[in-house]
Amino acid sequence: MATNRRPRSQREKYGEELRIRRIAAELTQEALSDHVVCSPTLISHFEAGRRLPNLEDAARLDQALQTDGFFARWLEDLESKFADHFAVAAELERQASELRLFGISLVPGLLQTDLYARAVLSTASPNYRAEDLDRRVVNRIERARILDNPLSPVVWTLLDEAVLRRRVGGRQVMAQQLTKIADMAEAGRLRLHVLPFGVGAHALIESMVTLMSFPDAAPVAYVEGLRTGNLMDDPAMVSSCQSAYDLALSDAASHQESLVLVRAIAEEHENGQH
């Protein structure tokens, strides 16, 4: 039976320990911020797990709280490979027993091939260094290792038809990407549904969303926009996202129909049609 809380990430455990040590030292957030030379708001973000201190700030935390390097040492294990707005979601993704993915314009990151991911990430800024791009692609592909287990997490994949039609990376890249998704669906690794253009407006037309369920904790929802993301664990908000997903799913093509459509569009890309 699920509890009323989602699993805590390591970042959140770090923040909770910081709060406990601060209170034990009889310091307010304002007083601690004076020692660290930062704003009280930043201390609040540290304690909530929304942000991590840099190494210099962690050392000043240890000095102020007399914790003998504890927070600086722990920090080394918490540095995320991902952007701050996604770091906690990425950690929870690994703990989930079920994932419900929706792609509105792009293939969800967990399902991307390396070439597709490279094409997406290379457009994120006006210029980039090759080594930075390589690192980001590797990080994205490594996330997908949670799918190596053939049974867990259970994965539902709902895609707007726009995801299939948008030619990211060129014909061959798209053909390879869609073939990968179709192969996973045919092998039973994911449940696949497509929202055809003919449906018109649908309940998820405004945003991508990922729904995560856990064996012993409450579910969460994650939505993402340009340079920002929102991890929701408020039960009312999560329930609203789940309802929107169910509504959109009810408008989608069946698993078998979706599989046929994805393979057909992959062939169109392969043959240079459209």
Image (cartoon, rainbow, N blue to C red):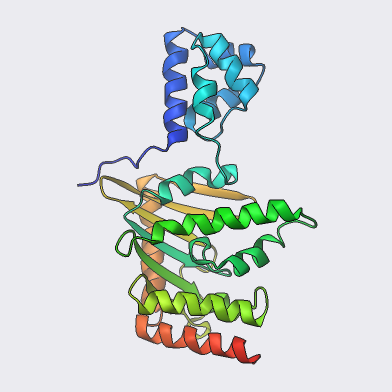
Q: Position of residue 63 (x, y in %)?
A: 57, 10
Examine the rendering and report whether any part of residue 164 can be seen: no
Q: Can you name the residue that lies furthest to the left here? A: 1
Name the quarter where the C terminus is drawn.
bottom right
Instruction: Left or right? Give the position of 252 relative to 53.
Output: left
| Residue nearest the viewer, comparing 167 with 70 | 70
Q: Residue at x 26, y 49 (%)?
A: 215
* Residue 185 higher or lower than 19, as above or below: below
* Residue 43 higher or lower than 68, as above or below: below
* Residue 163 higher or lower than 51, as above or below: below
Instruction: Left or right? Give the position of 163 relative to 246.
Output: right
Q: Which corner quadrant of the image does residue 155 belong to?
A: bottom left
Q: Position of residue 99 (x, y in %)?
A: 38, 59
Number of marks: 0
Q: Residue at x 60, y 49 (%)?
A: 228
Q: Position of residue 180 (x, y in %)?
A: 48, 75
Examine the rendering and report whether any part of residue 119 can be seen: yes
Q: Residue at x 42, y 51 (%)?
A: 93
Q: Residue at x 54, y 47 (%)?
A: 86
| Residue nearest the viewer, comparing 151 with 238 | 151
Q: Position of residue 223 (x, y in %)?
A: 51, 55
